[in-house]
Image: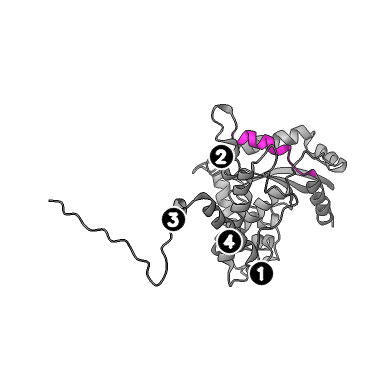
């Protein structure tokens, strides 16, 4: 025989009122909670969500990201990375360090892996969004000449970046980087996966191989990657202080590169507006194609000019 039990409503303890889950509240109220949390994260701590050059808040990035897609990929995600970074760096030597400084100096420390990941993702995501424009921007003459010398044509550069992004079997970034080659200003394309960074001083954590396709148990790339990991780990051992880490700026086998542009291939950035790409419609390829026409080439040229002083000093 089944006996019914009297259900007694729970009473809030310690004078606290019970609050329904966020999902059960009205949408406007839920949005106000998210906005309040975002505002708080921007106002507390040393690290913060920076203001972008262009204001995309109301309209999104025209013909690229909707206002909702922009909100998820920039405002919410960047806020989350900063919140996590503030949490991990509280009362540490990294609490009051610039974001890139944190990335470069935690790249070699396994114990700081979480700090590196949050700092690097925050930096990479900002790098991507600060290079966007609401309109099509012409490539400045000198930058165009340098890019054509490196890639043969601007169309070749476009195809390389777009199709490299589409071919990445995992989230990450496609970078246009500036290097010194045979005494000339040159550019190359490289990829980083997950929270990997392109900076030479942090090449221990560049993560430039696709673990889904490149690193097999017996593959040559996998064996080489393993050897480099062991070599880098041994080289980095004992370099625990910021002063000591300055002694070796470039990881073994690395070259000095300076990023000027990047394309974010994480799914949370493009899935909302472009879908999965089923049947050849939308997807990451269409997202990458649309991105090309929203690059702020003036920002790219400005960074390239600043990098020249470092490359040729």
Secondary structure mostly seen in the magenta stretch: helix
Q: Nearer the viewer, residue 189 or 11?
A: 11
Q: Secondary structure at mark 3?
A: loop
Tell me the tag on residue 169. 2
What residue is pinned by disc 4?
A: 83
Q: Is residue 294 magenta?
A: yes
Q: Earlier in the sequence, mark 3 or mark 1?
A: 3
State the extent of the magenta-drawn residues as a range. Answer: 283-297
Residue where numbered disc 1 is placed: 96
Mark 2 near mark 4, Cβ–Cβ under 8 Å?
no
Q: Earlier in the sequence, mark 1 or mark 2?
A: 1
Mark 4 or mark 3, earlier in chain: 3
What residue did someone put label 3 on?
21
Residue depth check, mark 1 versus mark 2: number of the one nearer the observer: 1
Measuring 70% from the left and 36% from the top, which residue is drawn there? 160
Mark 2, Cα crowd under 10 Å, few <14 / some 14-19 / many 20+, is few
Give the x, y percent position of residue 250: 70, 57
């Amino acid at each position: 025989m089944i006996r019914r039990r009297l259900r007694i409503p729970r009473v809030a303890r310690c004078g606290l009122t019970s609050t329904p889950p966020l999902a059960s509240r009205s949408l406007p109220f839920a949005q106000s909670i998210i906005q309040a949390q975002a505002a708080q994260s921007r106002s507390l701590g040393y690290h913060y969500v920076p203001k972008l050059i262009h204001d995309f808040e109301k309209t999104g990035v025209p013909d690229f990201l909707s206002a909702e897609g922009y909100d998820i990929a920039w405002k919410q995600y960047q806020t989350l990375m900063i919140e996590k970074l503030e949490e991990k760096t509280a009362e540490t030597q990294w609490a009051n360090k610039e974001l890139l400084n944190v990335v470069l100096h935690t790249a070699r420390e396994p114990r700081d892996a979480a700090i590196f990941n949050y700092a690097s993702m925050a930096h990479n995501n900002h790098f991507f969004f600060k290079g966007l424009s609401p309109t099509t921007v012409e490539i400045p003459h000198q930058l165009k000449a340098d890019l054509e010398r490196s890639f043969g044509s601007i169309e070749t550069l476009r195809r390389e970046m777009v199709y490299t992004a589409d071919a990445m079997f995992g989230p990450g970034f496609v970078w246009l980087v500036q290097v010194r080659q045979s005494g000339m200003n040159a550019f190359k394309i490289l990829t980083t996966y997950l929270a990997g960074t392109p900076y030479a001083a942090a090449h221990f954590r560049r993560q430039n191989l696709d673990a889904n396709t490149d690193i097999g148990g017996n593959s040559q790339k996998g064996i080489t990657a393993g050897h480099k990991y062991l070599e880098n780990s041994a080289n980095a051992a004992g370099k625990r202080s910021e002063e000591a880490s300055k002694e070796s700026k470039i990881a073994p086998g690395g070259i000095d590169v300076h990023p000027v542009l990047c394309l974010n291939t994480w799914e949370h950035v493009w899935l909302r507006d472009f879908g999965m790409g089923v049947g050849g419609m939308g997807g990451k390829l269409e997202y990458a194609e649309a991105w090309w026409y929203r690059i702020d080439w003036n920002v790219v040229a400005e960074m390239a000019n600043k990098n020249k002083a470092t490359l040729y000093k």
